[in-house]
Amino acid sequence: MRRIAANYMFPVDGEPVKNGYIEVDDNGTIIGSGRLTDELEDTEFYNGIICPGFVNAHCHVELSHLAGYFKEDTGMSGFINQINALRLTVDKEGRLNAINEQMDKMYREGVNGMGDISNCSESFAKKASSPIFTHTYLEQFGWAVDECGAIMDNAHKLLSCADSFGLAASITPHSCYTMCPELLESCIAAGLERGYISYHSQESPEEEELIRTGTGNLADNYRGRNMPTPKVTGKSALNYFIMHAKSAVHRGQLKVKQMENGEYAGEKIKGKVLLVHNVTADRESINEALQTFENVYWATCPLSNWFIHRQYAPLNLMHSMGLKVCIGTDSLSSNHRLSMIDEMKFIMSVFKEIPLADIIKWGTLNGAEAIGADNLLGSFTIGKKPGVVLIENADLATLSLTEQSISKRLV
């Protein structure tokens, strides 16, 4: 048994505790917590803040070999051009080494859970052997309607492969602008059969402009490559996804658990839906999602959004609406580090009115819920095994992070 204490303990399932401690057994399971009255000899006391292990709700760890290759502030159109040109510039051995290195680094810095996007199986072996719990979202693309069947067949083969590694996994669509409506709805249906979807939503103003008016840099990029574009709706990009999610249910593509008397009855769609990025989210589109999905989560990747667009999600609005916000790092094609503490520092530097306790909850329990691991991760609840992270160099007088704040694993 270990008793670990610090200037502050953030249990997440309760208020921060000054001079708080947690007790863990030899397997890392939480067996007790409280406030120190006397520092016993067997207490490990640290200067800083202790909190549960982080959950990186949105990552593309298989793109870790792209660190340092990409130019910043190119917008989505420029980013797509770079990913198409650079994705396979490193050989397989180099790609696997980069995955291993970044997974190990994330664990050392306190990540205990991850929602990870995979387009192939290269990360599966490492994720299966890592102490980090991962839900793997098997992301699909494609505009050719006559290829939808083959794409879904391959997606199910990849799902079977993930299953063989013992990974939690589900098929998921990418975004409104990378797939035809038929494939989008098939992926929604397949994801919800497993109960989990991750979807790149309202990632950029270019995406929003493409859906609302059919204009802008992203539209021009696609037309310049003779690529199809989504139907112009005059409404938000999130509305486009919602419309097709309802259509997938209505058309009977989901199993009976989503149906009532054989038809979509208009009740909220079940399953955990993780909307990623949300840079152009507004109150209207947010409310529509809340009215549509039973369990909707909102992943923010602020450093990635700043890298690509010099913008970020309206986290003050999302916080005021009480949304279940999660935090992700995205990939090293659009970020300099896969660091949850760096993401939290950036959020706190921009949105000073959001309390650190809420930001830590975003980076722990909310992410754990989104990937279906909240029975194990996300809080210092007795019986869980969430890991213990020390945040050093915080401002303990104001309970805020500083430029010098770092995180490291204790358990």
Image: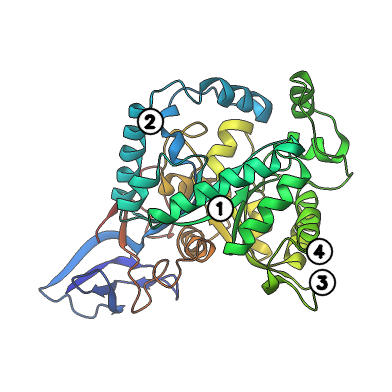
- Of badges 2 and 1, nearer the viewer stands 2
Q: Secondary structure at mark 4?
A: helix
Report crowding for label 2: few under 14, some 14 to 19, many 20 or more residues within 10 A (C-alpha).
many
Mark toward the start of the polypeptide (3 vs 2): 2
Q: Are marks 2 and 4 in contact (CB under 8 Å)?
A: no
Q: Give the image location of residue 239, x and y in percent.
A: 80, 52
Q: Where is the C terminus found, in terms of image quarters?
A: bottom left
Q: Give the image location of residue 132, x and y in percent.
A: 35, 55
Up/down of 57 relative to 249, above or below: above
Q: Amino acid at mark 1?
A: Lys
Report crowding for label 1: few under 14, some 14 to 19, many 20 or more residues within 10 A (C-alpha).
few
- Identify the disc placed on residue 352: 1
Q: Secondary structure at mark 2?
A: helix
Q: Secondary structure at mark 1?
A: loop
Q: CA distance from mark 4 to mark 1?
A: 43 Å
Residue 176 as seen in the image, left or right of residue 128: right
Mark toward the start of the polypeptide (2 vs 1): 2
Query: How does the figure colour the protein chain or chains?
Result: rainbow
Give the quarter of the image for residue 312: top right
Up/down of 179 relative to 159, above or below: above
Mark toward the start of the polypeptide (3 vs 4): 4
Q: Which residue is mark 4?
A: 250
Q: Which residue is mark 2?
A: 95
Mark toward the start of the polypeptide (4 vs 1): 4
